[in-house]
Image (cartoon, rainbow, N blue to C red):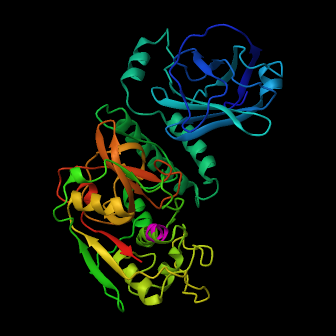
Amino acid sequence: MSPFALLLSAAFYLGAVSAHDFSICSGVSDKIGVTGVSLSPDPPVGGQDLKITISGTPTVDVTGGTLSATIKVLGIQIASVDFDVCKDLGITCPAAKGKALSGSFTYTIPSAAPSGVTASVEATVKDTSSNELTCVDMSVKVGSTYSATSPMQNLRSTASSSMSRKSVEFLFESWRKEHGFVHDFKDAEEFVKRMDIFGDNIEKIIAHNNHHKHSWTMSMNEFGHLTGEEFKAKYTGLNKKRPVLYGDVERDVHTAEGVLKSDLSDSVDWTSKGAVTAVKNQGQCGSCWAFSTTGSLEGAYYLKNGDLKSFSEQQLVSCDTIDSGCNGGLMDNAFGWIESNGGICSEDDYPYTSSGGTAASCKNTCTAVSGSTPTKYTDVSKSETALMSAVEKQPVSIAIEADQSAFQFYNSGVMTGTCGTNLDHGVLVVGYGTDDGTDYWKVKNSWGATWGMDGYILLERGKSQSGGQCGLLNSASYPTL
């Protein structure tokens, strides 16, 4: 049997089940009325079957549909399979609303699955029109196989923090398939090198997540085969040049003099107000500065015109001659270039093509969006109150130091870890707030929506270090249209 096979216990039955912690997926209306989830065995063990039972009382008639089960370990998808609710799960359709039912499916835990780590299981039920009936999230810690004949082996297994080579190979293969790195390594030597780096990164992630003092988590993503130095070289790209004034663009300074924090909103989120475009991906081009620039310009344009436009990073990367394309740039310079150019083209008219790391030559074939010319840009003074008052008005471009594993593998929560102020990456502050007692800045990144919290990171607000968390107070600015 394939280690990824999901087997069915094809029966539905009435009655209570033993409890396992679960939650309904964010944003999903639970029309199945899930009342409980159970696992057998709990905890599961590598090489054995894990039976997952979900009970509920539907609030709608169930006439058919699909159940999709996705299982991830350390952020790596190891299984995703769909089933027919009526045929495969044994339910007699239609099932009337208000009648309690419970169904089970079984996953065969691969023998190479690492012990001691937590797997995430997401089970989604949709009707025949693909409308979600429910979605259940749960965390499952994989246990160790107990050896009755070798107690010392049990002790070593429990005490060891290192993952076996077999487990690393299993996760590396799953990760390669998930992210399309099936034929990307030039030879066997490169393959082994990248797997070794992947294994080192997995150990960092496990060590971090096992540290209970952390308020944030890490997980594996498409950057797993890169060292920290390689990651910095490929995915940052801020140049700390002095701003160059173009044409008639005016430079202003926002100090928030006389403003108290108590005068400001407790929280702001421009994504929920419609002022922020979808998360973009700079790829292996050091063009973060261009994405930060367009982000704040998109916000300013929306606030003035009530229309959200996606602007062209490629035009900045290829045509802005003061900045350095894929070799870095500065947001203030880009604001000035856009003013001197009479505005900027839309993403649709000048799409991004530099994800491979090369900036194409400038094309003068598109027309700038009317009303996209900045009249000035404003630098924000280096205080938390000043940045809060600026973000209360509109999204703001900032620079941070992002050359550490904390950023490479950030997954969720408020990032309170140690990071410096050697600015190397341009991003966008789209809001601020408080999560479980910890104040944060909500920051949009340009590493794609699969990174972090759907492309976003929460950075600690109120950090005592000079310059704020990761230096985010040291180079903030925004344009005015």
> Does residue 340 sit above or below 212 in this rendering?
below
Placement of 262 over or under 281, stated as above or below: above
Span shown in magenta: 298-303
On the image, the x and y values in percent for residue 150 come to 46, 12
Q: Quadrant of residue 207?
A: top left
Residue 449, position as x, y percentages in the image: 53, 54
Residue 186 coordinates in the image, percent (x, y) = 59, 61
Q: Indicate whether 128 appears above or below 433.
A: above
Q: Between residue 207 and residue 87, name the one nearer to us.
A: 87
* Front position in the image: 472 or 157: 472
The answer to whether residue 283 of the structure is visible from this angle is yes
Q: Quadrant of the C terminus?
A: bottom left
Given residues 372 and 168, the one toward you in this image is: 372
Q: In the image, is 314 to the left or to the right of 325?
A: right
Residue located at (36% from left, 92% from top): 247
Q: Is residue 207 left or right of residue 345?
A: left
Is residue 16 positioned above or below 319 on the image?
above
